[in-house]
């Protein structure tokens, strides 16, 4: 399971309702990730199914397709987790339940940590904000994930 993210966590945040987050962002793009390797930056998340009664949803991540990274699609089957602000995920054909933790949720962005390729801390935003990410989102990402925001982030996703 996930440990604490890499940032100092000095900014205020309220623990969000996981299903409210799942409902709020049917289509989003990951702007930055915690290891700055750019593999998961610019990945698109598209919610393809949602069941409001059962509180579960399916998202398909489109990873790669820019900067020479081969494009692939990975399905994520998500439900709210056992504690507030968490979600459980089944990824692709893997039968092991993985964990996600929402650290910041605003109407423009999400900062979350999840068990994927080990541990991944991501800043998600709506696609229309791709080149105009609000400063509060970047501040929350830096505070939570413990990495410096890439000053060239506007150039990260030219094909998205």
Image (cartoon, helix red, strand yellow):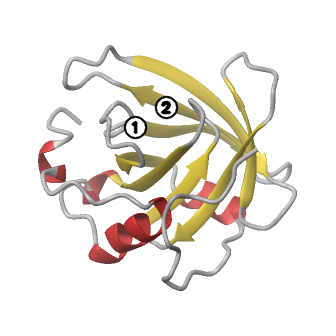
Of helix, strand and loop, which one carries label 2? strand
Question: Residue 62: x percent and y percent?
Answer: 42, 27
- Residue corresponding to mark 1: 44
**Taking 112 as reference, is 74 above or below it?**
above
For disc 2, the marked residue is 61
Q: Position of residue 79 (x, y in %)?
A: 77, 47
Q: Quadrant of the N terminus?
A: top right
Image quadrant in which the C terminus is located: top left
2 or 1: tag closer to the N-terminus: 1
Which residue: 81% across, 27% down?
A: 96
Camera-side residue of 133 and 122: 122
Residue 134 numbered mark, or none: none
Marks 2 & 1, CB-CB < 8 Å contact = yes
Local SS, label 1: strand
Residue 67 placement: quadrant: top left
- Specify whether residue 108 is in view: no
């Amino acid at each position: 399971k996930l440990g604490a993210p890499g940032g100092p966590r000095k900014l205020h945040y309220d623990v969000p309702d996981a299903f409210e987050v799942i409902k709020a962002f049917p289509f989003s793009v990951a702007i930055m990730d915690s290891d700055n390797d750019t593999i998961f930056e610019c990945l698109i998340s598209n919610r393809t199914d949602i069941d409001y009664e059962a509180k579960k949803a399916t998202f398909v991540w489109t990873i790669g397709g820019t900067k020479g990274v081969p494009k692939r699609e990975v399905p994520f089957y998500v439900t709210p987790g056992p504690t507030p602000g968490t979600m459980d995920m089944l990824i692709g054909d893997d039968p092991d339940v993985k964990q996600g933790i929402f650290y910041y949720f605003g109407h423009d962005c999400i900062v979350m940590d999840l068990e994927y390729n080990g541990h991944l801390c991501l800043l998600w935003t709506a696609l229309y904000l791709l080149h105009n990410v609000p400063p509060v989102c970047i501040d929350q990402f830096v505070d939570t994930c413990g990495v410096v925001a890439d000053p060239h982030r506007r150039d990260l996703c030219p094909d998205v």
